[in-house]
Image (spheres, rainbow, N blue to C red):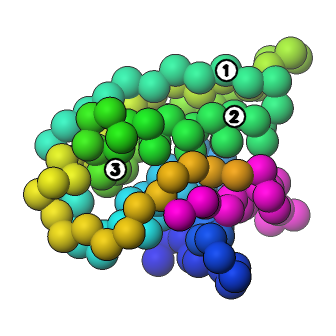
Amino acid sequence: MPFEYLPHTADVKIQAEGSTLQEAFSDAARAITHVMTEEKIRSELSFPLSLEAETKEALFFDFLSEIIVLLDTEGLFVSSCSLNITRSHRHWTLSGAVYGDEAKRYARHGDVKAPTYHDLIVEQLPTGRWRVRATLDI
């Protein structure tokens, strides 16, 4: 599994790793869906994304928020992402798309309200891989 759940007393803490920052972000998005359903999600729909933030942590937080907004407004369970993340001297940008299917087609248990900044991490490991971690308010 490309992501894992870490112990937390009240909420859900997710952690994902990838060979690229894009892969780690994408796996974190899939983890959000997996909190609510264990079914395999088809890629029937796509939605474009374009985000900008001053830090990579703020970009990750905004990305997770956008995944939850897509669930709330479009009823989207995410199955995968195609992302491009770049850094300039002043900010980080994310562009691409998320893919998934209508949540109503799947057995659902629980809900995710929002990401939090509690224990939020975006780091490059000594191996060159990327790790992201966030606590989700459920």
Q: Quadrant of residue 34?
A: bottom left
Are the two marked residues, 2 and 3, in contact with CB atoms closer than 8 angstroms? no
The residue range painted magenta reads 117-138
Where residue 49 sits in the image (x, y, percent)?
45, 25
Q: Nearer the viewer, residue 120 or 24?
A: 120
Amino acid type at image mark 2: Leu
Label whose residue precedes the other's in the sequence (1 or 2):
1
Q: Is residue 7 visible?
A: yes
Residue depicted at x 26% and y 43%: 75
Nearest to N terminus: mark 2 or mark 3: 2
Q: Nearer the viewer, residue 20 or 115?
A: 115
Residue 117, position as x, y percentages in the image: 77, 50
Q: For mark 2, does the 10 Å Cα neighbourhood hold few (<14), some (14 to 19), or many (20 or more) residues?
A: many
* Amino acid type indicated by mark 3: Val
Q: Is residue 44 left or right of residue 69?
A: left
Q: In whole angstroms, how far apart are the C-alphas of marks 2 and 3?
A: 18 Å
Q: Secondary structure at mark 3?
A: strand
Report the residue marked by disc 2: 59
Residue 40 location (% of width, % of height): 23, 68
Residue pointed to by mark 3: 78
Residue 90 place in picture, x, y as percent? 86, 15
- Which is nearer the eye, 60 or 89? 60
Mark 1 sits on what residue?
Answer: 52
